[in-house]
Amino acid sequence: MQRLARSDADALREQAAAVLLGNARQGYDRRWKRDFAYTSPARKGYPWQWFWDSCFHAIALTHIDLALAKQELRTLLAAHREDGFVPHMLFWGARLPNPGRFLQSRLAWNAKCSALIQPPVLAQAVLTVYERSQDRAFLTENVEKVKRYYLWLRDNRDPDGDNLIAVISPYETGMDQLPAYDAPMGSLNPSRLGLQVRGRILDARNLVSGRNYNSKHLFGPRSFNVEDLLVNCVYAQGLRATAGLCELSGDKTSGDSFIRIAKRVEQAILAKCYDKESGAFFGLAGREERPLRILTCASLMPLILEDVPKEILTRLIDTHLRNPSEFWLDYPVPSVARSEPAFRAAQSFLIWRGATWININWFLYHGLRKHGFQEAAAAIAFSSAQLVLKSGYREFYNPLTGEGYGEHNFGWSTLLVDML
Ligand code: GLC
């Protein structure tokens, strides 16, 4: 097994701290009537607060500054709506309205936040920050908000009642242009412009036909309506983390109830998304639940679940993850398997079409370790470190050459420090 030199690990930690501290934004927002302090994903390209980025930043910050980790989540949860919803983007300090923001938000001249969700990694972040800080006040302050958030997802995002939650746009999966969504977006072999136009049309439809992002109207016959695998695996993991938070705060009854919900989600993933023939998992599209048969990093995400038969996990790892013609490339794990016609290693105008992303590696690393696949986990951690040593904390990387693409000093790539 290859090991990282201690001096390299130290340098990576130092650089991660510089990235996160360098991306910090703070100020006072007149519309929210409050101070904000958070880490932007990248200073220029992504100035706002993004939901899952912030959860990742908080986890990475536990290795750097626990007070900042707590502050990150406090600022995120300031946008917690009374009914439990937490937005995927918070436009702190935005002075001018912007057309893209306008369509992804409830009607407002200059929206404060979006009306979309992102993969629900909130409870995992709150639990990690609590475990590492042992700050009871932080736990007490946030546990109710976390509970209400997951119950909101269950009650508002499962229109067919099958225990899998559905997304209304690819942006909600955090993997914006993953080829698995080409078909539900109605565009095969898409261009960047084509997908962006379709994305805006979908936003407009969610706003108008969804009657100002009202959950009751978001799943009409022409809606996106995808039961995404990554979103549902993160949801199941989040439900279990919520159960953990309930128990830590002395509420065993709620803890048991969240475990029951999590188990139902895990069973639904196994029953509806597992393809026995190929040994891979696929998300489902539309009311008729068409499997999205394209091998992407989402297909590997059941590795993070608790209750999956060992033989299914072993097959997923041996046949797909560790297959050099699919995911086991020089710098794993690519967002799309190499065997897929849509796979692109080099930078293109579309994102999530084959590049390696550190947040995906982080999920898989911890999933593999939990299930005892230490060697594969260590290989992913090692190659993630090599990516950053070679190319810096970039947004995403070429899985064949390790070249870095997209933003420089990108926040969530510092999750690497949680794998060292
Ligand atoms: C891109 C990513 C999304 C992320 C956002 C901010 O849109 O696809 O997952 O949250 O950038 O980093």
Image (cartoon, rainbow, N blue to C red):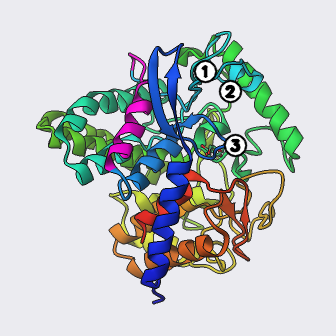
Residue 376, placed above or below residue 212: below
Q: Is residue 262 magenta?
A: no
Q: CA distance from mark 3 to mark 1?
A: 32 Å
Give the magenta part as a residue range: 66-83
Residue 223, label in figure: 2
Element class at badge 3 = loop
Residue 312, placed above or below residue 85: below
Position of residue 251 in the picture relative to residue 414 (left or right): left
Residue depicted at 65% across the width and 11% down the height = 107
Q: Amino acid at mark 3?
A: Lys
Q: CA distance from mark 1 to mark 2?
A: 7 Å
Mark 2 CB in 8 Å range of ligand 1?
A: no
Q: Amino acid at mark 1?
A: Leu
Q: Amino acid at mark 2?
A: Ser
Could you tell me residue 358's position as x and y percent? 56, 62
Could you tell me residue 117's position as x and y percent? 54, 32
Q: Earlier in the sequence, mark 2 or mark 3?
A: 3
Mark 3 CB in 8 Å range of ligand 1?
A: no
Q: Is residue 75 magenta?
A: yes
Neighbor class of circle 3 (other Cα within 10 Å; few <14, some 14-19, many 20+) is few
Question: In the image, which is nearer the foreground, mark 2 or mark 3?
Answer: 3
Q: Which residue is mark 3?
A: 44
Could you tell me residue 252's position as x and y percent? 13, 38
> Where ligand 1 lies, by image quadrant?
top right
- The answer to whether residue 133 of the structure is visible from this angle is yes
Neighbor class of circle 2 (other Cα within 10 Å; few <14, some 14-19, many 20+) is many
Question: In the image, which is nearer the foreground, mark 3 or mark 1?
Answer: 3
Element class at badge 2 = loop
Q: Which residue is mark 1?
A: 218
Q: Earlier in the sequence, mark 1 or mark 2?
A: 1
